[in-house]
Each structure stands twice: as C-alpha cells, then as structure tokens.
Image (cartoon, helix red, strand yellow):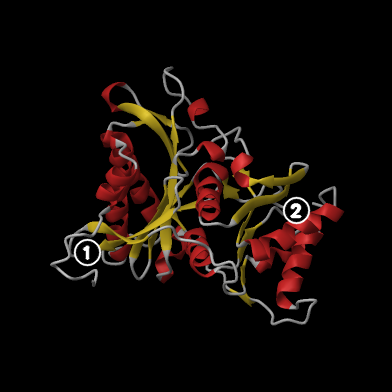
Amino acid sequence: MSSDNVVDATRDTLSSYIMTTTRDRDLALVMTAMEVACKNIARAVRKAGIAGLFGLAGTRNKSGDVVKKLDLLSNLFVINALKKSGVCAVLVSEEEPEPLLMEGNEQGRFCVAFDPLDGSSNVDCNVSTGTIFSIFEKKTFQPPSAKDILRPGKEIVAAGYCMYGSATELVVTFRRGVERFCLDPSLGEFIHIGSSLRIPKNGKTVYSCNEGNYLKWDPVIQNAVDNFKKPKDKSKPYSLRYVGSMVSDVHRTILYGGIFMYPADKKSKNGKLRLLYEGFPMALLVEQAGGIASAGFFKGKVRRILDLVPDNIHDRCPVILGCARDVEPVLSKYDDQPKSKL
C-alpha cells in the first residue's frame, strides 16, 4: 500500500518501531529526543537562506574547523532535546570543547556523542548535510564523567545519522540490522520505510575519497586508488563519487555499494574524521549492513574501527569502509607493508 495512503493504519513511526522491537523505554526517549532535534535542524536547513543562517559564525570548534551559523544552532537543538529527555548522563558534541555532564533530575543511563551538522560547509551551496550520533550505555553508578564514553565502538548500543537532502531520512541501528525512516512532513513523523538494509555485495563500482590528498597518502592507498581508476585486470574503471559530506557519501555506499575512504596522510597521521561521533557510528552502521569498516594501517597494524579506544572525546581516526569486494583488497595490500610510510 502506498506510504501516502491515509487509510494505512499499519505504518510504524520511529517511536512505535523502537518500543515494538527493543521494548526499552529509555532508549525510546533518547531516540525521540534525537528525532525532535533532527526535525528542528531539517527545518532550519531548509529555511537557512530566508532566516539569514548562511555564512560563518566567526569562531572555530575544538577540532579547529571553522564554525557556521547553522552549526551553532544545530548544536543547541541536539543538546536541549537530549537534556530534556532525562535519560542521558554524558553528551559529547563536535562543537563543545568538553563533555557536558548531566546532574540531578536530568541524569540518566545513556552517553551520546554527536556531530550536529556534518558537512555544514556545503549548506550555502545547497548540498546534503546530516547529523551523526552514537549512543553508549553508562556502566557505573558513579557521577558522570568523560570516562563513561571513552570506550571502544563495539560497546555502542545504537547509532545513526539523519540526512537533510531532497528528503529527510533517518538511518539507525540498534545492533539488529539497519533501519531506514523518512520524515513525512504532513504527519511530522519519521515513517519506517526500509528494514534490515544490506550493502550490495556486487553493487556499483564506485570509489569515494578526496583525491586532492593523493600525494599525502601512503603507497597502499595510492595504489588502491590507481587500481580503481585503471584496474590491472583490464575491467571497467570505477567511477569517482565524492560529495564531501560524510553522511551523503556513506548513505550512498550503504545503498549502492562501493568504498568510501578518508585515510590517514602525512598531514593528518591520525586521520581527520572524529572517532566518537563520525568513525564509530558509521562503522557500526556499515558492519550491521554487512560491510567492512577499517581504520587501515593505524598505530602499527590494520585495525577495525570499532575496536579502537579513544583517549580524548575529540580523537580522530582514518576511515576505510564499504562492501567486502572493494575494502578487502585494499586492506590485504598492507600484508606486504609491515610499516607505515607516512
């Protein structure tokens, strides 16, 4: 039945889906908070030009990135929604230098890390942006601290992203597959439109990376990209697709296949993408969709992203993720290169 049919009473909203599948009230509350924040951000993004929200805010965040006006507004939307949920203990945002620790009645059992508006540099030219988040469950009964969230990604209980493009889509995992929801403006609700998403094993032959960094990469990554463009087996070359918004590039990779890479390089030896609120959530989503998410050759060996343990809330990591067909050959090349050349 059409999703726009008003007599269809069987459609799941995000809240009803969570309660039906997890039966976790607190998880439903934290996801409802994220849902409210994402609706507010989607509205602000669509009205940015009219509301005078294009342009820079005149500041830089902890990672050194130039902050946009919409970055600050999006950050406030997420923080306020999560605080009011009453189920969070620690909040980590790309736009905040230190973790936000909940107190009193605001304190709960979840620790949430988020990038409020990934790809915000693209807002002024009307390219898709998104919100990325990961959710951990607090393990101790001690007062909240940064230690509660400085844990390996394999301990995440839920993660996802909301993409603001031609439609507003929320893609999320509760460690039981990847689910897809789309915002129905007429209802004001995220409607479940796809269950157990899987990355195609033999999907589109697409590679996605910022080739402007080619000369800074190690030989393995350079050779991998060279082979995508001119395969040694004389097969059809891969197509380059790079938006520069991680949400958009990973979303395409999950739906169509291929590989996305933002590897370490001579300038950024620890990678550029932040671990807690970019690397971890995207890695979990990709693995839950049947793909591979690796940091490549990082700190002495090839490492799975979800096995990394951050020392700081804004730690970075290299990212190589996508379908096994394309990721495994890249990682296998490190077998003959025991030491990084960066």
Q: Choose top left, top right, bottom left or bottom right for residue 257.
A: bottom right
Rendered location of residue 337, percent (x, y): 85, 53
Residue in the picture at 69% in, 63% down: 213
| Marks 1/2: CA–CA distance | 45 Å
Nearer to us: label 1 or label 2: 1
Q: Secondary structure at mark 1?
A: loop
Q: Residue at x 29, y 21 (%)?
A: 104
Q: Which residue is mark 2?
A: 266
> Is residue 246 found left or right of 173 in the rendered image?
right
Precedes in sequence: disc 1 or disc 2: 1
Viewer can see residue 181: yes
Residue type beneath disc 2: Lys
Badge 2: how crowded within 10 Å, few (<14), some, or many (20+)?
some
The answer to whether residue 132 is left or right of residue 214 is: left
Answer above or below: position of 329 versus 340: below
Tell me if residue 135 comes above or below residue 202 in the rendering.
above
Against 220, residue 72 (above or below) is above
Q: Position of residue 179 (x, y in %)?
A: 39, 56
Q: What residue do we see at 51% from left, 63% from top?
A: 254
* Identity of the residue drawn at 69% across and 52% down: 264
Can the viewer see residue 116? no
Q: Are marks 1 and 2 in contact (CB under 8 Å)?
A: no
- The residue under label 1 is which amino acid type? Pro
Q: Which residue is mark 1?
A: 185
